[in-house]
Amino acid sequence: MIGISQDDLAQASGVAKATIATFESGKRTPYERTLRDIRSALEQAGVQLLATGDVARGEGVVLATPKAPAASQASMDASADDVRSQAADAADRAMDGMDASQAEKTSRRKRLTDAPDGTKNAVKNDRANDEGSE
C-alpha cells in the first residue's frame, strides 16, 4: 500500500526485522507494546488503521488523505464571480442571432447571471415566454 519494507518498518518502529517477519508469517503474536510501536510507525507513514465497527470508512486499513484547507470567503467569491462571468458569456453566445431586442437580451442575461437562487426560475420563465411568442 505504501511501499514500506520490513527494514524500513523495523527502523521506524524500533522492532527487529526478524520479529516483524515472524508476525507477517503468523508464527508469532506480537505483544501490545510492539503493536503500538508498529502502529505508530505505520501511521507516521500515512496509514490509517480502522477499528472494528468504524462504519464511516469500513473495517481495515486505508491510506490517510490529508484534509484540504478550507476555502476562504474571498476565494469562494472569486470562484462565484468566475462562474457568473462564464454564464454571461454562454448566455451571450446562446442569444446571438436571437429575434429579441437588446433590452430583452440584457434582461435575460441579467436574470441568468445575477440571480443565483432564481436561475432555474428565470430559465423556465424565459422558455415559457418564448413558447408563448411563437
Image (cartoon, rainbow, N blue to C red):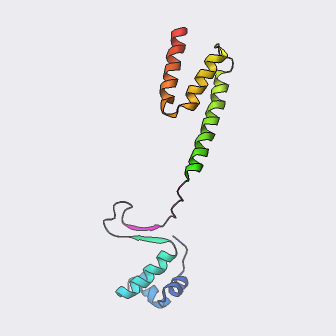
Q: Is residue 90 left or right of residue 17?
A: right
Q: Residue at x 38, y 87 (%)?
A: 33
Q: Vertically, is 78 above or below 124?
A: below
Q: Which quarter of the rendering shows the C terminus?
A: top right
Q: Outermost residue toward the left?
A: 53
Q: Vertically, is 10 above or below 86?
A: below
Q: Outermost residue toward the front?
A: 74
Most common SS among magenta residues:
loop
Q: Vertically, is 8 above or below 120?
A: below
* Residue 54 x/y as whole percent: 34, 64
| Front position in the image: 79 or 9 | 79
* Residue 50 x/y as whole percent: 38, 69
User: Splitting the image into 4 quarters, where does residue 52 fall?
Assistant: bottom left
| Front position in the image: 41 or 29 | 41
* Residue 18 x/y as whole percent: 47, 90
Q: Residue at x 49, y 20 (%)?
A: 125
Q: Vertically, is 17 above or below 105?
A: below
| Front position in the image: 104 or 59 | 104
Residue 67 sits inside the magenta stretch:
yes
Residue 50 visible in the picture? yes
Q: Is residue 28 left or right of residue 75?
A: left
Q: Is residue 119 left or right of residue 36?
A: right
Q: Is residue 73 left or right of residue 26?
A: right
Q: How many marks?
A: 0
Residue 29 visible in the picture? no
Q: Residue at x 43, y 84 (%)?
A: 37
Residue 97 sits inside the magenta stretch:
no
| Region in magenta | 53-70
User: Splitting the image into 4 quarters, where does residue 110 fall?
Assistant: top right
Q: Outermost residue toward the right?
A: 97
Q: Residue at x 55, y 83 (%)?
A: 8
User: Splitting the image into 4 quarters, where does residue 31 fall?
Assistant: bottom left
